[in-house]
Image (spheres, helix red, strand yellow):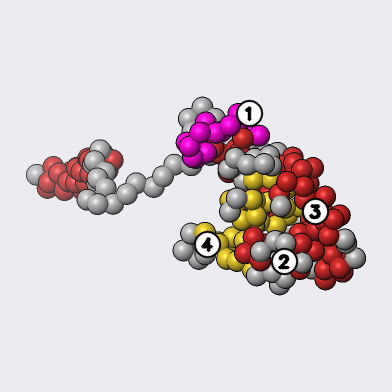
Amino acid sequence: MKKPAQRTARKAPAKAKAQAKAQAKAKTKAKANKPKPSAKAGSRPKPRKSPTRAAKPTPSRRAGSRHKPATDGTQWQAFVEQHGVVLASARGPVPSVASAIAGEPIVGSWWAHAKAQVIFDALSSIDDSDDIRCFKLVDNKITFVHRRLWPALARLAQAGILVRARVEAIQQEHMPTGEHRNFTIPFPEWVPDDVLARAERLGIDDARAQLGNVI
């Protein structure tokens, strides 16, 4: 009778091991099937890296137009050099930059014209040139004068034929706030020494002839 009892005692540990193994397997399976916790409220998912793309061009102010900064900038500086004296946009006895770009006289403000962006770029390019100065010379309107005519301008101002208010240089500066302000530089403070020297050697009649109907 003792032998059967010994057999039963020997089988008990094997059965316990089998049960423990089954329980461990069940726990592992349950852990694998356990759903992952969702993202916390208010948290942002990490962005995915998208393929590298070329930057899109900035659209111009008017739909359908192509804005190329400084396009034809040197062309309009050369336009001022060719004519010597030009108006920015007003009508008068000398050519107008705005009208030349538009291909026609502009009625009203050039800001409302279809080529307003091109006109703006051209005027900005002209204003940035060291060989061009801005005045209110013709009919008290914004006028650009190329360096080659500065001696004539200075000579007639020295002689009192041109009032000094007409030959005060206008300079635009960009303020930290983003706005643009115009500052005037009185005559002859803006005139370079070499230009003053040439003006002193220039006759009044020659100066008048160079400036033509601007006087």
Residue nearest the observer in this picture, 9 or 58 = 58
The span from disc 1 to disc 4 (Cα, nearest Å) is 29 Å
Q: Give amino acid for label 2.
A: Gly
Mark nearer the viewer, 1 or 4:
1
**Lower sequence index among marks 1 and 3:** 1
Asked if labels 2 and 3 touch by Cβ distance under 8 angstroms, the answer is no
The secondary structure that most of the magenta stretch takes on is: loop
**Lower sequence index among marks 3 and 4:** 4
Asked if labels 1 and 2 touch by Cβ distance under 8 angstroms, the answer is no
What residue is pinned by disc 4? 181
Check the picture and name the quadrant holding the N terminus.
top left
The stretch of residues the image draws in magenta is 100-115
The span from disc 1 to disc 3 (Cα, nearest Å) is 30 Å
Q: Give amino acid for label 3.
A: Arg
**Circle 1 crowding by C-alpha within 10 Å: few under 14, some 14–19, many from 20:** few
Asked if labels 3 and 1 touch by Cβ distance under 8 angstroms, the answer is no
Does residue 57 appear in this view? no
Is residue 91 found left or right of 161 in the rendered image?
left
The span from disc 2 to disc 1 (Cα, nearest Å) is 37 Å
The span from disc 3 to disc 2 (Cα, nearest Å) is 13 Å
**Lower sequence index among marks 1 and 4:** 1
What residue is pinned by disc 2? 160
Q: Give amino acid for label 1.
A: Gly
Mark nearer the viewer, 3 or 4:
3
What residue is pinned by disc 1? 103
**Circle 2 crowding by C-alpha within 10 Å: few under 14, some 14–19, many from 20:** few
